[in-house]
Amino acid sequence: MKRIMPICCLPFGCLIVTLCGCATPEKSAQDSGEWTIPLGSYSATRHSRLNQIDSKNVGKMRVAWTMSTGTLRGQEGQPLVVGKMMYFESSYPNFVYGIDLDNVGKIVWKFAPEQDKFSPSVACCDLVSRGVAYADGKILAATLDTHLYALDAKTGMVIWTALNGDPKLGQTMTGAPLVVHDKVIVGISGGEYGVRGHITAYDLNSGKQVWRAYSVGSDQDILFDAKTIDGATQQAVGKDSSLKTWEGDEWKLGGGTTWGWYTYDPQLNLVYYGTGNPGTWNPTQRPGDNKWSMTIMARNPDTGVAAWAYQMTPHDAWDYDGINESILTDSVVDGNTIPTLTHFDRNGFSYLLDRRSGKLLSAHKFDPSTNWATEIDLKTGRPVLNPDKMTKEDVNVKDICPAAQGAKNHQPASYDPRTKLFYVGTNHICMDYQAFGVKYKGGFPYVGAILSMFPADHGNARGRLIAYDSVTGQTKWTVDDMFQVYSGPLTTDGDVVFYGTLDGWFKAVDEATGKVLYQFHAPSGIIGNPITYMHDGKQYVAVLTGVGGWAAIGLAEGLTKGSDGLGAVGLTASLGDYTNLGGTLMVFSLE
Amino acid sequence: MKRIMPICCLPFGCLIVTLCGCATPEKSAQDSGEWTIPLGSYSATRHSRLNQIDSKNVGKMRVAWTMSTGTLRGQEGQPLVVGKMMYFESSYPNFVYGIDLDNVGKIVWKFAPEQDKFSPSVACCDLVSRGVAYADGKILAATLDTHLYALDAKTGMVIWTALNGDPKLGQTMTGAPLVVHDKVIVGISGGEYGVRGHITAYDLNSGKQVWRAYSVGSDQDILFDAKTIDGATQQAVGKDSSLKTWEGDEWKLGGGTTWGWYTYDPQLNLVYYGTGNPGTWNPTQRPGDNKWSMTIMARNPDTGVAAWAYQMTPHDAWDYDGINESILTDSVVDGNTIPTLTHFDRNGFSYLLDRRSGKLLSAHKFDPSTNWATEIDLKTGRPVLNPDKMTKEDVNVKDICPAAQGAKNHQPASYDPRTKLFYVGTNHICMDYQAFGVKYKGGFPYVGAILSMFPADHGNARGRLIAYDSVTGQTKWTVDDMFQVYSGPLTTDGDVVFYGTLDGWFKAVDEATGKVLYQFHAPSGIIGNPITYMHDGKQYVAVLTGVGGWAAIGLAEGLTKGSDGLGAVGLTASLGDYTNLGGTLMVFSLE
């Protein structure tokens, strides 16, 4: 396969050459008609320049072909398309497929990993996978039981395997790997089990661990050095920047798991990701800022060393697990075009950072119901808290917005460079939150809070698709949905936004207005992320359908009966009136 | 609901009136645009007079909507459509759904029975259901653990339940009920567990058992009386017609299970069905004709008493389990039009009987590879055996055709009264068969034979769709398929035959030629039976997809690896290259 791709990335620029069989997938595969990186490109814009399907003809779209994933649990990922092959990973037991696009439905290979049977019992939020990565003729796949596999993309044969965690301690893997240079970068899940999060780089060729960076702990563990910048203060973080924000040994159960998406800037040679909630959900039990939980991190992919770290929610008291993706675009700020990073956090604020330094440029409530903080102070980088919504042990704090499930969860947003707007699947939900003391026991939940979630505004719209300007914080249009929008939108040069709903509608809406142009009732609710690709001169849109995830955990675990008011389960207690479990790949095209 | 239906059926005629809320679904719902009986009508022709979708426009068909069944195992049934509602039953754990057709995807109710967890371990051939019945505002559903439920069709609430068997003894239920007058008629599965088969009638209003007729045993048990005719001889069967064809107590493990389809002639007031294999598959262990296994039965639905019985395969030595459906049509025989019954048996012969008396009119090999018998002697009604293919204990008899899975399995055929042809999904497979001695233990397999199945003619076509004349035995056209055709065809006045393939293609072929006019790659392989219905003036075609059943038992049980030559598993060892487990309702329409 011949591609144009960066091979040698220096601090502020990349050598671009044409070569074959390279390790790093190209940045613009989404524009060439392939989809070689989970979020389409290193920058995670989830925008494609394909325009054969457009706002005028999308109403004539139809289902071209389909394929069961062979599993029932939620499908949070997306397929990759590399050349004439499609690859995807199912929910647990994490089947991985190589499919011949020239021969519809032909399963060239299926990888069915033998897994530790214990891992499903410690997965907090359904048994999901967010997909595979591709590089250098290999498919990289993480399994729930914390194995990372490199598979031959042609045959599915295992080339190497690495063990990244221990399910007996509540560690699981649900995120998609990101390959940069010759490193396979993966995170760890288990934020509800006192798991101390880390990201780890494995050698693409051998599977050997190259580096590991924890989210909390000693400077040596977290790979911070003298030059690491605190994004909030724009000062060097100093010694023991994490340890000194914890009392006693609580940092050892410090959370900061890393189960979200990873992005990469080849010019800066920095990988970006978010860290999760700080261990127990009971904030009284862990005084301090709890750094570097709830943080956007920028790290060198070759060494793991942090360039900067910006903590969004110091001393989290709401489970605003900060793992959402950081989308890399250029933004015009004060008349200057600069390289920025946009992050829609669970806490209801969109953050616009200078991605060179982590400097906060703006922060806005993208969910207007957000009430735990009034604003983010641009000078200090810290939220201005609403004391009425601060939770503490043994107090039931009411009507906090957003709920722990977030104003947006992991579902990745899309950015269209033509409109300069973000298209975001959001939640519109609030909660009551009662923290309680909890003792750690390895492999058992370390949660320490009882929650009750409900729609914001005492309404019925638990979710909304929005078109949003992260510089100004203005929402151009909103499409309400009965349930949380838990599918990552896709935009294209055809002026269409594709996404799915929890109750099973796959939709194409007008990018200019949000008007529904096409909708199809899929076999199951959609928490996966549509992609688009070309095959034999024809544009296709593909999405993994299959309800589940935290949004539909009641349905996934069979807990819906009599569950009104019971955490995330009660929030979607009526979902079973609309959809069923079951994973299916759906592929659409024009006639 | 207002319908024209027979309410008072006398021996040779019916009083037809218009009335409301009647117990018996009308015969011609399939023509009016509903589909109220599992096989479309009492006569099981699976032909609809709908013609909006026809051979000229079917190429423009598309998927209208979809719904996951919420289960992974094989889907052998079909939906019903009554008024504005659709109903269907999934594979185990046997979810039953009521769906609002006015509100696509709205699950009005879902019935999730609590089941005996033991029953899946004794189901020989996947955890299937062949669907629900409808009558008098009730949905009748059988579950694998041998419960029969009457559910309120509006709400899904249980009106009554009846226990029809004991899974601990290997008894299960997979067949669809048939409602006649105020009787709900059901069979029992478990032919591989020494289960003595029976059919049972339950009162539609109370669920109380009204009568039970065993397939083998005393006259009292089998409900034979002095007037019961032996179809083969056209004489009264006489006393102890079953018992005297068995040695010792072997009849108690005598098989003759009743898991297939039931049909009904209102004029004759007779229900027709087939009985299965005689207990152990080792024929040496059970000398004699083993009556009334392998028999087409005609019984009075009100009393259960047998009018006649025609045994197709006396002393079965090949597991030619005779449960296939009996299709009721008129046929011109020797210049006279008479009421006939056509039965495509697993043993490779099509039987044409006078359905008033069970008299054999003709029998032809519909699978030309059939070699266990050279013909059926019309005078004696018995097969003329090929001694080379008679199996016996401890001898491996080679190249017997068809294989135990049959030249046709349970998948119901279609008959078009316009062409006077049957459209049949058939298998084209042979076997080696080695019987061995086996001891009975309740709840354990009582099989007594090791089989190896393979394609007939040493070819690759394991299945064929045929257009067939059961009077002359002539095949008008044949469409070869790589795998067994395990989906029941549907014909319509649009001159189209709809069916599915084991590797997941839903097809529409030209009724005149077999030419493929449309095909769609479904999420999973198809062993279900398409139906058609009208809704708001538009014709729809619906099919349950979801591979499994005996044909795909290797895939269903995860046994495909290294299984070449291993019974039914080896026969479809490559199926996993084409399709995946997963149940989905697929609904098609024109634009």
Image (cartoon, coloured by chain):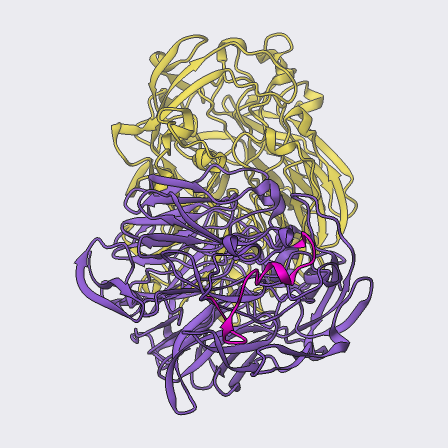
Chain colours: A purple, B yellow
Q: Give the magenta range.
A: A228-250
**Image quadrant where residue A257 sits:** bottom right
Front-most of B556 and A571? A571
Q: Specify the farthest residue to the right.
A: A394
In the image, residue B402 lies in the stretch drawn in magenta: no
Q: Is residue B472 visible?
A: yes
**Image quadrant where residue B566 sits:** top left
Predominant SS along the magenta part: loop
Residue A27 at what x, y percent from top left?
A: 30, 66
Q: Is residue A146 left or right of residue B456?
A: right
Image vertical order of residue B179 relative to residue A277, above or below: above
Residue pictured at 61% horizontal, 58% vertical: A243
Q: Quadrant of the N terminus of chain B?
A: bottom right
Image vertical order of residue A472 relative to residue B213, above or below: below
Residue B96 at what x, y percent from top left?
A: 63, 51
Residue pictured at 53% horizontal, 72% vertical: B536
Q: Is residue B335 visible?
A: no
Image vertical order of residue B127 relative to residue A351, above or below: above
Front-most of B568 and A346? A346
Residue B204 at what x, y percent from top left?
A: 73, 46
Q: Specify the farthest residue to the bottom.
A: A335
In the image, residue A244 lies in the stretch drawn in magenta: yes
Front-most of A114 and A355? A355
Q: Is residue A541 left or right of residue B277?
A: left
Q: Is residue B439 left or right of residue B542?
A: right
